[in-house]
Amino acid sequence: MPLEEQAEYVIKNYCKDGYYILESVANKKNDTILNLIKKWKMDELFNTIKVAVHEECHDYQNIMNKSQYDWNNRFWIINQTHILNGQPIVVKFVPDKLFKTELALNNIPENLKTLRWKTYVSSGSQNASNVYGIYGLLQEYEAYYHGDKAVYDTFEYVKKFLLQLKISQLIMKE
Ligand SMILES: [Zn+2]
């Protein structure tokens, strides 16, 4: 079975939140869950599950509710969708009126800067986690949460599945 089909099977059967995210985005985009997973296909199953749920969580955040233009004040209002207790919740913000995360750079002690620091927070980063300030950090926090939770939720099954695969490969070699 191709990796993306394996990933779809385990997410569907073992990861409620991840499946909710993929299903919502697929419905909204008039696409299939399999196609969404295929875009994020990695070297192996756990990575594929993690990355697909993480990245499609960003799609969920961005496309479930449209942004609006405020003609009186002449700025965009972003309607970011997050998930709270399995339900969508809209968080509104105005990108023109917020502080980039990089403004806090000098106040973060060196020992708290992890390996993702440079990509997500450092000066000049074009990621939402910098450009959208605290709202962007919230996006990444949520996407990492769901990506990692998907691995956690599917871990026992995938472990057994991979073990069986290894055993059958060993048997076939004999
Ligand atoms: Zn992300």
Image: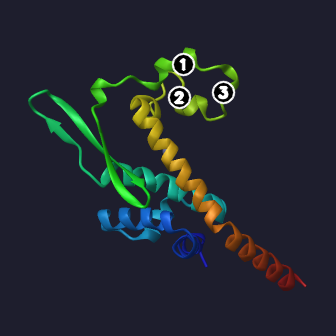
Helix, strand or loop for disc 2: loop
Q: In the displayed structure, does residue 149 sit left or right of residue 124?
A: right
The dot on residue 121 is 2
Neighbor class of circle 1 (other Cα within 10 Å; few <14, some 14-19, many 20+) is: few
Q: Quadrant of residue 118?
A: top right
Q: Is mark 3 within 8 Å of ligand 1?
A: no
Judged left or right of residue 170, residue 141 is left
Q: Give the structural element (helix, strand or loop) at label 3.
A: helix
Q: Are marks 1 and 2 in contact (CB under 8 Å)?
A: yes
Q: Amino acid at mark 1?
A: Leu
**What residue would you read off at disc 3?**
112
| Residue at the disc numbered 1 | 105
Disc nearer the start of the sequence (1/3): 1
- Dividing the picture into quadrants, the one containing residue 23 is bottom left
- Identify the residue at horizontal 60%, vertical 54% (top origin): 148
> Farthest residue in the right direction?
174
Q: CA distance from mark 1 to mark 2?
A: 8 Å
34 or 145: which is nearer to us?
A: 145
Q: What whole-number distance in Å separates the C-alpha atoms at marks 3 and 2?
A: 12 Å
Label 2 crowding class (10 Å Cα cut-off): few <14, some 14-19, many 20+? many
Residue displayed at 56% across by 16% down: 107
Upstream in sequence: badge 3 or badge 2: 3
Which residue reaches farthest front?
85
Q: Is residue 32 above or below residue 55?
A: below
Say if 77 sits above or below 36 in the image: above
In terms of image quadrants, where is residue 41?
Answer: bottom right
Give the x, y percent position of residue 123.
Answer: 51, 21
Kind of residue indicated by mark 3: Leu
**Which three-letter amino acid code belongs to the residue tagged 2?**
Val
